Image: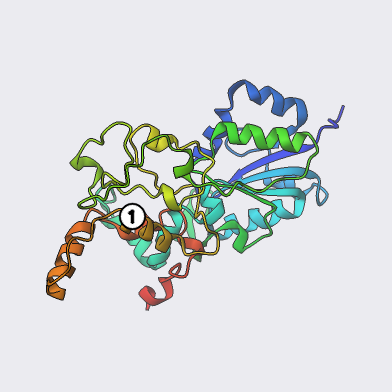
Amino acid sequence: MPTLKPKLAMYWAASCGGCEIALANINEALLEVDAHFDFMFCPCLLDTKRADIEALPDKAIFLTLFNGALRTEENLEMAELLRRKSQLFVAFGACAASGGIPALANQHGIGHVLETVFRTSASADNPQELIPGATSPVPGGELELPAFLQRVLAVHEAVTVDYTMPGCPPEPEQIVAVIRHIASGKPLLGCTARAVCDQCSREKRGSLAARLIRPFEALPEAGWCLAEQGFSCIGTATHGGCGALCPAVAMPCTGCYGALDRDADPGAAALSALAAVVDPGESSGKAEADIHTHLHSALAGVADPLGTFYRYTLATTVVADRSPEVDQ
């Protein structure tokens, strides 16, 4: 007998699989999902095929949780298909919301990315130095691989998104809250405007760090703001909702819930947040070159500025795409 429950789908594009684990981590609340929804499509959990989705009437799926950025033509096709078949379409996790880690590749051309991954990376074991092509002969026929898009896209750059659930991955309690809210029939709500720092229990003493330090250089003092100790914690500029879980275990916030101010450049906001806690030193009477040297030394703890300030957001920023430049 066909189910009368609304259909729920989940799909991963360019992502690590952590969002599926986050869904599994809602534990016994999965029984609530089963009670309210027909969970009918999730490639890593269910054997539903793409053809089954294509055969559905438009809007037949009530809710799709789409995680991952759009890296390949197949990712884009699936986003367009699931958007067409869904009533509610959620960008689920940091990669879907703003490109995430995959979008860091936008600073390099496709040729450079393939060369690095398959030939020159320290972990590559490829004595024949092969690079996958669009088609490859195999016994019994020809294998086709989806082509790379020119650059990695956040999902909202390609299709209309009804709701964004940030996080790397979203926290299980957030997932449960959204599913319960949707199951109640109420309209989706936006996120709160609070920063991670507002949810962090660490003490702000108003002191300035002598310099920024990398995590391996020191053990943070318990209970004291990590940024004030010189660690690259960007909770001041990051959207809350995670419960400040990383700072609670002495890990600096890396910004996975996205920029607090959606109108601001996230990297610039993160940089400003860190610069505000670093002691600029006494500049009176000093030569400009000496001031520059001091500031450079104080900020040298950020070894990878792009990966620090745009780790999850590069696809949607003004510095998003250098690939045409580096491919020339």
Q: Compared to 92, does 317 lie above or below?
A: below
Between 313 and 242, the residue placed more toward the observer is 242
Residue at 76% over, 25% down: 35
Q: Is residue 24 left or right of residue 34?
A: left
Question: For residue 3, which quarter of the picture?
Answer: top right
Please, which colouring scheme is shown? rainbow
Q: Is residue 291 left or right of residue 62?
A: left
Q: Compared to 30, does 324 lie above or below?
A: below
Question: For residue 225, which quarter of the picture?
Answer: top left
Between 280 and 316, the residue placed more toward the observer is 280
Mark 1 residue type: Leu
Q: Compared to 163, does 325 lie above or below?
A: below
Disc 1 target residue: 274
Assess disc 1: are there few (<14), some (14-19) or many (≥20) residues with their C-alpha within 10 Å of its C-alpha: many
Location of the C terminus by quadrant is bottom left
Between 31 and 131, the residue placed more toward the observer is 31
Residue 159 in sight in this render: yes
Percent x, y of residue 195:
49, 47
Residue at 81% over, 52% down: 58
Residue at 68% over, 42% down: 49
Location of the N terminus by quadrant is top right
Percent x, y of residue 44:
57, 36
Residue that protrudes farthest toward the bottom in the picture: 328
Question: For residue 103, which quarter of the picture?
Answer: bottom left
Percent x, y of residue 77:
64, 58
Percent x, y of residue 118:
33, 54
Q: Is residue 239 left or right of residue 271?
A: right
Between 260 and 114, the residue placed more toward the observer is 260
Mark 1: which secondary structure? helix
Marker count (numbered):
1
